Image (tube, rainbow, N blue to C red):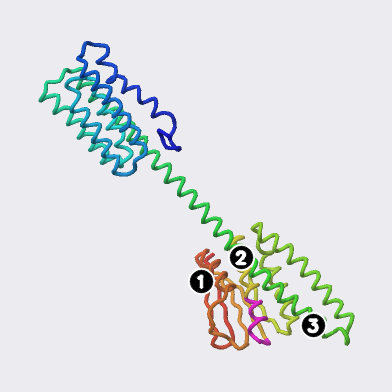
Amino acid sequence: MRLLPKDQDWTPYAYLIYLAYYALLPFFFPAPLWERALTVVVTVAALVLYFSGYWLKDRRILWVIGGFVAMGVALIPSNPGASVFFVYGASFLGKVFEPAPAYRYLGGILAIVGLEAAVLHLPPFAWITAVVFTAMIGSVVIQQCQRKRLTDKLLLAQEEAQRMAKVAERERIGRDLHDLLGHTLSVIVLKSELASKLTASDPNRAAQEIRDVERISREALAEVRSAVQGYRSGGIDRELAEARQTLETAGIRIEASIQTPRLSPAQENVFAMALREGVTNVIRHAQASVCQMSLRQNGRWCELEIADNGRGSAAEEGNGLSGMRQRVEALGGVLERNGSAGMLLRIRVPV
């Protein structure tokens, strides 16, 4: 059995000091026995109501607030210490309402105290105590509850941001590994097939191709490690050199016109990865003999075009093109694809 929820600190116990004002007053001054007995019963009931308020949620707490206000109205004429019940009622308003409606309800409680004081001619020390402490403590708790709400929202937003960052990072690693390994494995397959064909006719050339396979495999391992760490390419120049070598190995003639404008690291990374993915698709799917590439600045845009004279395609985008589109659009760019006559891939990014 717990009097308070696990997420609650010890301060509610300290607030019970106000209840002693009501509970002990009849025992320090002359009072009939029935009044003292009633005080004990009401004190127990107030404790039950008080601790229940920390367990209830939402508008169910209004029953606690209403109970305290009713006890205050009924008992303050005979025991001025009953003014504490108005204080307890006001202290739960912040748990139910945002500040604006909470203050309206607080004003309602104060109006009830003032009306009862005027009608029953309560002594000043009774109603002034009720008004001052109800207004002061009610306002403080309303603000505390609002700060807690804002803090909880901020923590929730931070948790969501962290979760989304992890999801985005997993997606980035997935896209990068797809592009890196797709390209590299295509090159390894090509060189392995070439080495197999050259084994009998040109052993020295076959050995050179196998050494290239070993070199490319080691480079791929380093690139995978870099991708996981967040460094995803070696830049446009390196990708262009790799593209030339890969296309030549596949027997595809390359025609390139590269005029690299000044790019940010993020922009250069996008173009480098797009170049890699485009060349990989030409080798895998195009059945082309010529691949044309151009990179230039056109006004406020930087454009990369990769075109081939292959069979073209109107098929839906795979994971590689989808990942490329996400990278380009993240920079405010556009990816265009036309497979009606060969395949044309155009990436435009603002610079």
Tell which circle, 3 or 1, labels the residue nearer the N-terminal end. Answer: 3
Location of residue 289 (image quadrant):
bottom right
Residue 132 drawn at (x, y percent) = 25, 24
Residue 214 drawn at (x, y percent) = 81, 70
Instruction: Please give the name of the residue rendered at 55% of the width and 66% of the height, measured from the top-left corner.
Output: 327
* Range covered by the magenta-colored residues: 278-289
Inspect the image, locate mark 1, and give the three-letter code of the amino acid beneath it.
Val
Q: Which mark is residue 334?
A: 1
Q: How many marks?
A: 3
Q: Secondary structure at mark 1?
A: strand
Tell which circle, 2 or 1, labels the residue nearer the N-terminal end. Answer: 2
Q: Secondary structure at mark 3?
A: helix
> Quarter holding the C terminus?
bottom right
Instruction: Please give the name of the residue rendered at 24% of the width and 24% of the height, measured from the top-left corner.
Output: 83
Instruction: Please give the name of the residue rendered at 16% of the width and 22% of the height, measured from the top-left corner.
Output: 77
- The one nearer the camera, 281 or 300, is 281
From the image, tell me which residue sits under label 2: 174
* Camera-nearest label, 3 or 2: 2
Residue 253 drawn at (x, y percent) = 71, 84
Q: For the residues marked 3 and 2, what is the alpha-carbon distance in whole angstroms?
A: 30 Å
Q: Is residue 307 above or below residue 9?
A: below
From the image, tell me which residue sits under label 3: 194
- Relative to 243, 56 lies left or right: left
Mark 1 residue crowding within 10 angstroms, few (<14) / some (14–19) / many (20+): some
Q: For the residues marked 2 and 1, what is the alpha-carbon distance in whole angstroms?
A: 21 Å
